[in-house]
Amino acid sequence: MFELIKINKGFVTKTGVSTIGLNNIFLKLPNKGLIFILGKSGSGKSTLLNLLGGLDKCDSGDILINKFSIKELKQNDLDDYRNGVLGFIFQEFNLIESMNVYENIALANELQGQKPDNKLIYNLLKEMELLGYEERKINELSGGQKQRIAIARALVKNPEIILADEPTGNLDSKTGEQIFNILKKLSQDKLILIISHDVESAFKYGDRVIELKDGQIIEDLTKDRNLVKTKQPKFTQGQVLNEDIIQQIQDQAKNAHREGFVPTQEVLLEEQPVTLKNVSSQLPWKKAFKMGASAFKNKKVSLVFSALIVSWAATIFAFIVETFISFKEALRKLILVTITGYANANPAMKKQIEESVNLQLEQKYDTLKEQFYLARIGLIIVLIVMSLIAFMMIYMYFNASIKLKKKEIGSLRALGARGSTVSKIFLSEGFIYATTINILILAFHLLVGARFTVFSIIATLRFWLILGVEYLFVYALTFLSIALPIYKLSRKKPIDVIANK
């Protein structure tokens, strides 16, 4: 299944110190079996898991997955590999807070474009002793319950490989044994790789145990089922225990859990390349809208503030556009307003004044147009400034939104969602945001025209033209503003999104 060839991976800390994650790793992993990776914190366990899962990339060396080089896979290919082949069990759970228990488990099916397998989901919940928790919110669960949900989510899509980071770290001993028994059974047909500090469980359940230290493999043991167990020393009553016997007893007690394990010899891999079941990720628009809408509850103040600013900018934008389109009509109205007595004149007098103004306007339009040249330049500057202000308001709003959702986005990417799939969430949020502002604009127009009937307002062509310009301005500016943050987010490695880099 996996072949690691001279893998090196380093990191630079926030203080600028270089550290070694993995150093010159050579390793072969078969297509089935339960393999434990042991080691202290900082030994390279999680780094190894991230590389195998396509969450991160090595600095040098190569990883072959069924004879295919991981170097030849683009980011989208790695996402498809995680979505179709891997089941991840994370130490930090990586559950989606805006979804309930059932939706979190079903998400693994939906990302593959499949309908949730209700029967399997309920069977998994029953096996995890969480039946009846389907509608519970994630923040209502204990750490152990969250861990079991994360395990159920990994199992529901029947992956070829399961990568687990401390899967029983938050569970009691009884539940931990149940999980190990489930994984042990699955390992008869799948490759299951577990990172753990639990040495006793590793040798109890594992087919192979690998220990890392300072980024290097210091021990690689495999269970030999044909190995004859060491006979326990028998003692007779009154026998004197000498130093050799005491040492033998101590050695056996110290290494009791290692009984039956021998140094790993050659690991046989498939001779011919086997095509992996890579699946392009999908996310239903309904779920994307739900996740997008959930962001608003945490940003109510910034939503109101930015909505008012953008609405104001859109109104000014529409006014300036209308002025440029019908410049002659705008001049005519301006001249009429400046004529003394026009407002209070009788209809006949008003008509006479208007005809006179129209005649003069036709005769002097070119001259007046030149005189108002600077005014038009000023309007263009105002137009640009207002557009930039609105753009920055929306950009800052969605930048904040992305920061708030980094954890959820990281979880989705780790599960196998492509960057383009994740972008649907922010496009949905952008649509809701822009629609909310446009409703506010409509309400403003109706409020300004309160002295008229609603029908008389909406029946005019001018009303719809102005409203259309404002709506187009808001939608266009919103999607332009979120395009750059979405692009930057989609280009990041999943591990960088998870680590909030």
Image: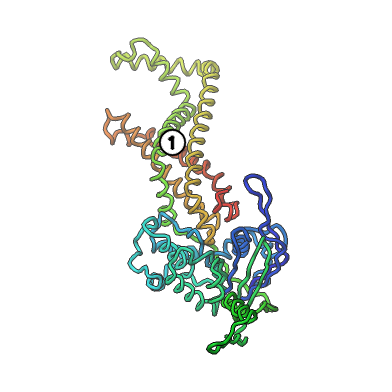
Question: Residue, x 53% and y 29% (percent of image)?
Answer: 384
Residue 101 location, x and y as percent? 39, 62
Front residue of 413/433: it is 413
Instruction: Give the quadrant of the N terminus.
Output: bottom right
- Structure colour scheme: rainbow
Count of all numbered marks drawn on residues in the image: 1
Q: Is residue 497 above or below residue 433?
A: below
Relative placement, left or right, of 336 versus 492 is left
- Say whether residue 32 is visible: no
Q: Residue furthest top?
A: 340
Q: Amino acid at mark 1?
A: Ser
Residue 285 x/y as whole percent: 44, 56
* In the image, residue 385 above or below residue 361: below
- Does residue 214 sit above or below 275 in this rendering? above
Residue at image mark 1: 306
Q: Position of residue 132 (x, y in %)?
A: 33, 67
Figure check: 260 above or below 35: below
Q: Count residues near mark 1 (Cα–Cα under 10 Å), then give few for <14, some for 14-19, many for 20+.
A: some
Q: Position of residue 361 (x, y in %)?
A: 46, 17
